[in-house]
Amino acid sequence: MTPDITPAAPADLPAILELLAASKLPPAGIERHVASTLVARADSGVVGTAALELYGTAALLRSVAVATRLRGLGLGAALTGAALDLARRRGVSTVYLLTETAGRFFPKFGFAEITRAQVDPVVLESPEFTTACPKSALVMVKQL
Ligand SMILES: CC(C)(COP(=O)(O)OP(=O)(O)OC[C@H]1O[C@@H](n2cnc3c(N)ncnc32)[C@H](O)[C@@H]1OP(=O)(O)O)[C@@H](O)C(=O)NCCC(=O)NCCS
């Protein structure tokens, strides 16, 4: 079946954490952003995630992950597109992200590399920037 992409519910948190661990992505702070997290659901449960941390008109796109067995089928692209739609609906104009592994995936959606010095100071204070992601991670931005 094609997984449905829907808003996450608090009860999805354990499955989201499991998927992040399997995808080697940092879990730090995700529990505070479940209300702006999307999940892809299959019969087997949560098979994909994409989360937004909302900071006024800026947002951090994080935790974009697809279960290993379902990669390469368009689900990551669908989750990223749905997260960007959600950001637009929430009045976000600038979306940032950090990645160590998908620097060639996100440009497909209009993200371009920037330096940390170019990031909105409010977003720079998020746990992803301060502790979870190494300084070597790429920083990218997309204007909506
Ligand atoms: C990155 C990830 C979410 C992509 O999910 P996916 O479902 O495999 O991606 P899709 O099938 O939607 O791929 C869409 C396109 O991106 C390409 N792509 C997928 N993963 C890529 C990667 N890591 N680097 C570069 N391109 C990638 C695909 O080839 C495809 O290209 P096409 O449109 O030209 O055919 C998935 O590989 C994953 O969970 N990785 C581990 C977690 C991670 O690194 N997340 C990103 C940081 S938040």
Image (cartoon, grey):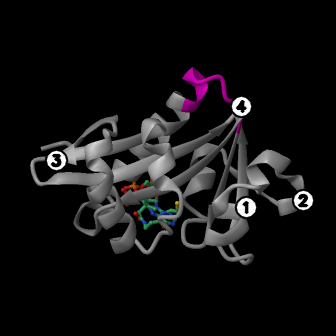
Quarter containing the N terminus:
top left
Neighbor class of circle 1 (other Cα within 10 Å; few <14, some 14-19, many 20+) is many
Neighbor class of circle 4 (other Cα within 10 Å; few <14, some 14-19, many 20+) is few
**For numbered disc 3, what is the local secondary structure?**
strand
Query: Mark 2: which amino acid?
Result: Ala
| Label 4 sits on residue | 56
Q: Position of residue 81 (x, y in %)?
A: 48, 38
**For numbered disc 2, what is the local secondary structure?**
helix
Comes first in the chain, label 1 or label 3: 3
Q: How far apart, in angstroms, are the residues tagged by discs 2 and 1?
A: 10 Å
Neighbor class of circle 2 (other Cα within 10 Å; few <14, some 14-19, many 20+) is few
Comes first in the chain, label 4 or label 2: 4
**For numbered disc 1, what is the local secondary structure?**
strand
Q: Is residue 95 left or right of residue 75?
A: right
Identify the magenta region: 87-94
| Label 2 sits on residue | 117
Q: Which mark is residue 139?
A: 1
Placement of 132 over or under 107, stated as above or below? below
Comes first in the chain, label 2 or label 1: 2
For the point 63% across and 53% down, the residue is: 107
For the point 53% across and 57% down, the residue is: 29
Query: Can residue 18 be seen at all in this image of the molecule?
Result: yes
**For numbered disc 4, what is the local secondary structure?**
loop
| Label 3 sits on residue | 42
